[in-house]
Amino acid sequence: MSSEKIRRVLILGGTGEASQIAGALLARTDLMIVSSLAGRVAEPRMPAGLVRVGGFGGVAGLGAYLRDERVDVVIDATHPFAARISRNAELACREFGVPLIAFRRAAWRAQLQDRWTAVADFASAALAVDREGNRVLLSIGRKELAAFSGCTKACFLVRAIERPDVPLPLFSKLILSRGPFSIEEERELLRAQAITHVVTKNSGGDATYAKIQAARELGIDVVMIERPEGDRAAFGSLDAVYQRLEELLVTERARV
Ligand code: NAP
């Protein structure tokens, strides 16, 4: 491989950080950057530069893409709850000998005034909140709402970007809106709707943290769904991702 070769980097995205990485690497003349989105929302926020949309077709499909597009490095910057694509990336990269850099933002940690109940999954969260008298803000996206479809006791305020395609809990009101929401907006919503419980994934990061802050201020219970991933190795900062990318590029250049 000649040292002038342009290296192809595939960013598995769908997060703010993935867009940040694409933006930061876009000006590099030694790299060709392609961002990949799952295509879950009709009008996604597009990262800068080249973008492909839609699933690859499992590990085999992703492997074929890496081979056909001659991808040199994969950066997995998907959401911490997008466990399947991350696992697929690990397997496909291993099989095709493509270096993988995984980024995972840090999980939120409870502060002193927080009233959190940590649960392992969506079904446990549904069990924890479905009680008469509870008024629950369900802010977990569309994908996992089915775990709450059988709830019949609590009143739910379901917030999603697009209309869910599963039955909502018996007592529910749907708000279609896209964040980020400010702390003022979240405080107002929790107060106006007399919310007693917030159900959320432990996504980490700033973009969806305002509801946690607002719940803390108002003394509202939070049911925190912990991450599905166990202790998969990943970098926790974008600087570490950029540094690892440089190391890989230097190693590859030294090989020619
Ligand atoms: P997932 O359960 O891990 O993946 C399900 C399937 O969707 C994958 O097997 C893959 O299909 C496809 N896919 C996922 N991410 C993709 C990507 N970046 N590019 C191409 N195909 C992708 O993922 P998910 O939880 O549904 O999340 C989908 C996307 O939304 C991710 O990109 C993620 O970063 C973003 N997102 C997720 C959440 C969340 O809470 N889960 C929140 C914010 C953003 P094939 O097997 O056919 O390749």
Image (spheres, rainbow, N blue to C red):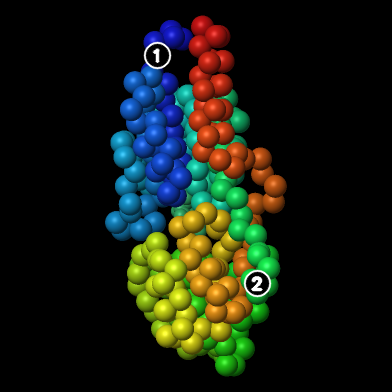
**Residue 214 can be seen in this image:** yes
Q: Do the residues labelled 1 and 2 touch (CB within 8 Å)?
A: no
Task: Mark yes or no: residue 145 visible.
Answer: no
Is residue 130 rendered to the left or right of residue 190? Answer: right
- Judging depth in this view, the residue of 254 and 55 nearest the camera is 254
Check disc 2 and report its element: helix, strand or loop. loop
Disc 1 is placed on an element classified as loop
Residue 112 is situated, as x and y percent measured from the top left of the image, at: 68, 68
Which residue is outermost to the bottom? Answer: 133
Q: Residue at x 57, y 45 (%)?
A: 104
Q: In this view, does 162 lie above or below 2?
A: below
- Residue 123, given in percent of the width and then of the height, sits at 62, 72
Q: What residue type is labelled 2?
A: Gln
Residue at image point 39% right, 73% down: 185
* Residue underneath mark 1: 5
Q: Which residue is drawn at 43% across and 8% down?
A: 2
Residue where numbered disc 2 is placed: 113
Label 1 packing within 10 angstroms: few (<14), some (14-19), many (20+):
few
Measured Cα–Cα span from mark 1 to mark 2: 54 Å
> Could you tell which of marks 1 and 2 lies nearer the N-terminus?
1
For badge 1, the amino acid type reads Lys
Res 86 label = none
Vertical placement of residue 43 versus 143, above or below = above
The percent coordinates of residue 165 (x first, y second) are 40, 71
Q: Which of marks 1 and 2 is in front?
A: 2
Disc 1: residue Cβ within 8 A of ligand 1's nearest atom: no
Of residue 137 and residue 229, the one placed in the foreground of this image is 137
Residue 151: x and y in percent read 56, 84
Figure check: 3 above or below 146: above
How many numbered callouts? 2
